[in-house]
Amino acid sequence: MLPTGLIVLIAVFGLLLLLGVPVAYGLGLATAAGLLVTLPPEPALTTVAQRMATGLDSFTLLAIPFFILAGQLMNKGGIATRLIDFAKSLLGTLPGGLAHVNIVASMLFGAISGSAVAAASAIGGVMNPRMVEEGYGRDFSAAVNITASTTGLIIPPSNILIVYSLASGGVSIAALFLAGYLPGLLVGLLLMGVAAFTATRRGFPVSERVPWRKVGRAFLEALPSLLLLVIVIGGIIAGIFTATEAAAVAVLYALVLAFIYREIGVGDLPDILLDAASTTAVVMLLIATSIGMAWLLAYENVPQAVTEGLLAVTDNELLLFLMMNLVLLAVGTFMDMTPAVLIFTPIFLPVAVEMGIDPTHFGIVMVLNLCIGLCTPPVGSVLFVGVGVAETRIMTVVRPLLPLFIAMLVALAFVTLVPGLTLWLPGLFGY
């Protein structure tokens, strides 16, 4: 028999989602409703407010607004165009050259900005018109941009990996950042494989070979942007600064770079700061209400019950991991990534640890699952942004999206079944 508080929580949250209430409000109201049937009104509401406030009282979480601001500065600072030019100079002559450029540029920009939505918007806004002009098709261009943009959530620096570190109770952010590189690259390579096959079958055009002199020039122009990854990740791994301090350094570096590129001026800063503040407020409200719900789930002993229930079904590690993957894939289709990580990490991580799965490996698998959800309706934020930027419709994008979606599922299977893909780099650096 499910606890009354849990039944009310699930019922109210589901109803609010069906009514179109924003997820953050739905989480907070459902948590309050669940506690109101368990505790008297005053302590119930006080507990919800207290848990939300104390959940945000974290030095680690300070990294998120800094990385969001850095991403805004990069999005408007001319970095996307330089990354696209560099990728095109290297990959334009391959079958489906512009599709490869879209994928690699999205990976680079997503990794630098830490935001899949920013990558879909910035890279898609530049690449979609070029691809349409050269005959790739608006829907195929949108599908490539949508799937490739999610790799920036796996390749560091990534805000969602910071959120997972918080939800897991302290998995090393440096280890998570290192663990994301090979899985992120694997997703990108598989997407490029699908793009090359499609391009060959449909006879997409190939760009002329670029002289090495122009490749070198494009690389030098993109190098200052690429150095941000080296500075941020290298500084964290070397112990020079924490993830939060690295995020602050990223803001300063991105600001200086944007001024050097002369893409933004002092007059643009108020709008950039306002956009960053708005995005931060949304993310932090999601985190606060998710932490409140996670506390109620712990109060009702849900993680322990799920652990016992799953282990009672089977003690086969592979089967249990497959079951968790299927649940996370389903969750990703209707829930935003941040609350999904905060709610399901405390539920599934104890099961994973009980089976001997490394928490770092489990974190990357969880994030990759939820990245796939970002590309699917009804809630996929990257899907909607990518479709909007390409000025097309979801129904027409689905067909070219399916092979790329399958490539992401294949990558998920490899990452799940081969822990070395995730754990080799952290182990190499002693994490």
Image (cartoon, rainbow, N blue to C red):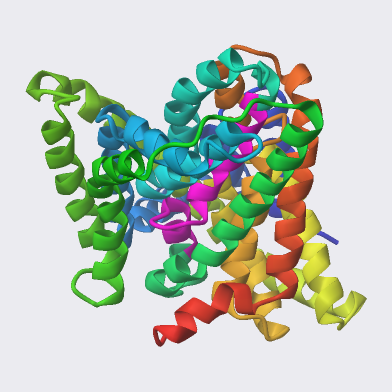
Q: Position of residue 366 (x, y in %)?
A: 63, 60
Q: Residue at x 72, y 36 (%)?
A: 14
Q: Name the residue at 63% across, 25% down.
A: 141
Residue extending farthest to the right is 313
Q: Is residue 312 above or below residue 406?
A: below
Residue 70, percent from left and from top: 26, 42
Q: Nearer the viewer, residue 41 or 110?
A: 110
Instruction: State the predominant SS element of the stretch in magenta.
Output: helix
Q: Residue 23 at what x, y percent from top left?
A: 57, 34
- Residue 13 colored in magenta in the image: no
The part of the chain drawn in magenta is 141-164
Query: Looking at the rendering, which quadrant does residue 156 occupy?
Result: bottom left
**Quick one: 270 or 3, which is closer to the camera?**
270
Q: Quadrant of residue 221?
A: top left
Picture quadrant where residue 62 is located: bottom left
Is residue 159 a member of the stretch shown in magenta? yes
Closest to the observer, 100 or 321: 100
Which residue is drawn at the image coordinates 11% and 23% (left, top)? 265
Can you see residue 296?
A: no
In the image, residue 345 sits, relative to residue 394, either above or below, namely below
Provide residue 59's location: percent of width, then percent of height: 26, 62
What quarter of the picture does the C terminus occupy? bottom left
Q: Residue at x 81, y 80 (%)?
A: 317
